[in-house]
Every structure is written in C-alpha cells, then in structure tokens.
Image (cartoon, rainbow, N blue to C red):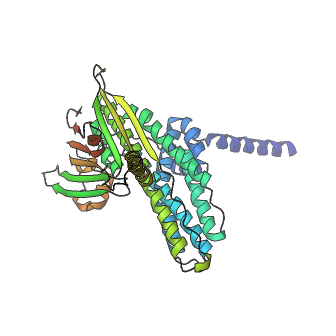
Amino acid sequence: MGGAKRRRVSSRCRRNTQECNKCTLDTLPPEILGIILKMLPLHDVACIVRLVSRRCSDIAATVLNTEFLVAGTKLDTTIKRMENLTNIVKNYNELLECNKVLNFLELIRCQYRMLKAVTWRYTHPRSRGLPASCFYGGKILDNLNCLLQTIYDVCRRSCVFSYVDLQIFMRSCDNFMDHFEKVTECRINRSALISGCKLVDVLDCLEEGRQVLSLRISPRTGNPMVSMHVKYVLKRAWFTGLHVPNANNECSWRDKQRYMYLRLRRLIGSYNKHLLYKLHHERILRITMLSPRRPPSRRLPPRRPPLASTYSGYGEYGGQLFYYGNMSEYAYENKFKSTRTSSAENTGGELEVTDKPCFDLIIGVQLRCSPELAPLKTKMNLQTDSLDGFDTNLRKELYLKLSIKCAASKVNRLPDNFTWEVRGRAENRLRC
C-alpha cells in the first residue's frame, strides 16, 4: 500500500512539474507579461528583456513607450503640486527651497518636451503602415522617476535635491537624442511623410518667441489640409548657411532632414537653457529682496547673475556649411559693453552710448500638410472633431518651407537669408 501511494504522489508531482514547465514567457498573455515588466527597472527592460525574442521586444517596446507618456503626466502633476506648495509655505527657507526645486522641474520639463518632439512620431505613429520604434532610453525613464520621487520626498520631509542628479539626467537625454537621430531615425526614416512636421515640433519647444500668424483647415472631400504660418524669434542667436565650393554634393534628402533637425534641436536647447537660467535668477533675486517672510534687516545682498555663456556649433553636409549658436543676455551685455569701453579708452574721449546691434534670429514657417502629419502642438489645440477619421488617409501630402533671417550674419557681411523646403507626396524630394 505504501509503495502504491508513493507512486500516485510521484506521478502527480511529475504532472504538476510538466504543467509548470509549460508556463514560459512565450505562453504568458501579453497583458500579464507587460505588468511583470513594469515592476522591473526600465533600463533592464530596454537592454535585456527587449533582446530576448521578437515577442518580448514588442511587449517591452509597448511598456517603454507607455511609461514615457506616463512620465510626462507625472511631471506635470509634480510641477502643479510644487507651485501650490510654494504658495503655502510657512517660512523663508522653505520658500527658497521650493522655488529651487521648481526651477529644476522647469529644466526637466524643457528636456522632456524636446525628447517628445524628437521621438513621438516614431514611437507613437498615428497612421497605419508607418514603422513604429521604441523609446529604448530606459535609463532616462528610471532617472526621471527617481527625480520625481525625490522631489515628492522633498515636499514631505524636506530632503535635499541633488543638482548632480539633474545634470546626469540632462546629459543622458542629450546623448539619447543624438543616438536616436543619428542611428535609429536614419534606419527607419525613408520618407518625408514619416517624420512629418518634426521640424515644427522641435521649434515649438521654444520657451518663448512663438507666434502663430494663421491657422486653418481647408475642407476637401475626404482629404482636408492643415495650413499655417508660424513665426519664431530667438534673441541673440544666429544661423548661417554658406555654400562650400568643390564639395561632394552626393547626399540623400533624408539625411539633409535629419541634419537640420539636429542643428535646430541643439540651438533651441541652448536657447532655452539660457532663458531659464535668467528667469530662475530673477525669481530667486525677487524672493530674496522682496519677500515679506524675511525681515528687512536679515535680507541677503543681491545674488550674482549667471555666468556669461555662449553656444556655437557648425556642420557641413551636401555642399553647405552651417554655423549656428546663441549667447545669453549677460554675454551679450558684456561683449558690447567691453567693446565700447575699449574704444573710448583708445580715443581718450568719453564713453559714447550707442544702440546695441540687434541679433534677433527670425524663423518663418509656411506649412501645408495632411492632418495626421500636423505638428503635435497644433493637433492638441485643434478640435478633435475636425480631425477624426482622417488618420488613415492614404493621400498624405506635406509642404514645409523654412525661411531664416539672421541679423547677426548681415552685421558680419555674411548671407542673412536661408530657405529650406520639404515636399512629400507620391514621390518625395527635398530642395535646399
């Protein structure tokens, strides 16, 4: 009897073991596997799980793309919470700490918006037939979630927010966008209709200087078109295109697109940083000097302004050399102040007060495209009823003209106008 009982138990254990062995990653429902992957570090999901199999790659891509959008929602919620907390703090030190964290959050939001402008047309394509990619920056998402959790702890227990962690996050975002545009986008972007109005998405990341001159949807039978004119003004910035004689003009139109995206992204990223640093300095200065929460006898002297900073970049492609950059307001003031002072000293006369040269970079965009190719900011502002049902339109069209007027180039006797066009329809071509 004992031997028969042991045989029944052992046979039951073997059946249970066989059934457990059948439960693998390939047999789990995708919803269950997605829930499991969300519990892992997203860096491991991007670098390990995504490489296991095609099925794991698809599910991991869905998890990463979803978490990227969720991170944007968390970021907006955290900023609103910090703004509300700033209005109810009880003492001066807490007010300074809250504003410091709010300044960091604005820098993070600026970087997140640029990440979305660079990737969303590939990670979340709105039209059928377009290739879908993955937001494989799992380490960026882990760092962002860690920063937001740290800020949440700051709100509760007055913990210290690390500026080094912020710098690491900013640098990792820049590296990811460089890799995405030079490697991933190069592999999957084979038509102007895939990237659509990404150039306008990048320009829309400007913190200030955007002005919509006109916007309308022209009715067509089954094929409406979005037409708009937008003007962007960047103060103390320049963008010059020079023809390179005897250069190799063999280049693909899609590489011209990507190189233009990369140049404008770096220019706008630098411009936003200079702008936010100035805004943050003025905000802290105003709180320090005028806050009623601190007695006048204990107010600190004015803080030093941010360091004078200048950014410049260049690149050659397709027979043209592009030189671009911008300077902060403090660098601009120091540059022309020192010039006038040295001139007065050399002549031995009094300091002559002259008007400072205008270095405003004016970028005009003329756009006509199908609704599914429209810029993200425009699609969010338009009524959804007017765009419903057209995301599957097969007759997509795109015309985008970029007109750049650079006053700084004119001062330096360089070409002050530059035009760049993209056309995409049945046959795609780029003229520059």
Q: Residue at x 63, y 56 (%)?
A: 162
Residue 338 in the image: above or below residue 157: above
Which residue occupies the foreground of this view, 409 or 151? 409
Where is 306 relative to 296, above or below?
above
Q: Position of residue 10 (x, y in %)?
A: 78, 42
Q: Answer left or right for 320 relative to 310.
A: left
Residue 189: where, in percent of width, then height? Answer: 35, 35
In the picture as drawn, the residue positioned furthest to the front comes out as 348
Residue drawn at 35 percent across, 47 percent down:
237
Q: Residue at x 53, y 40 (%)?
A: 56
Q: Is residue 267 visible in this depiction of the protein?
A: yes
Q: Quadrant of the C terminus?
A: top left
Q: Please report the residue visible at 24 percent of the width from the left and 53 percent of the height from the top.
A: 230
Q: Is residue 397 above or below residue 378?
A: above
Q: Nearer the viewer, residue 72 or 412?
A: 412
Above or below residue 277? Residue 315 is above
Q: Can the viewer see residue 77 in this picture?
A: no
94 relative position to 286: left or right = right
Residue 364's x, y, as percent? 24, 48
Q: Quick check: 4 left or right of 398?
A: right
**365 or 284: nearer the viewer:** 284
Number of marks present in the image shown = 0
Query: Looking at this rendering, what residue extends furthest in the right direction?
Result: 2
Q: Residue 202 in the image: x percent, y percent? A: 36, 48
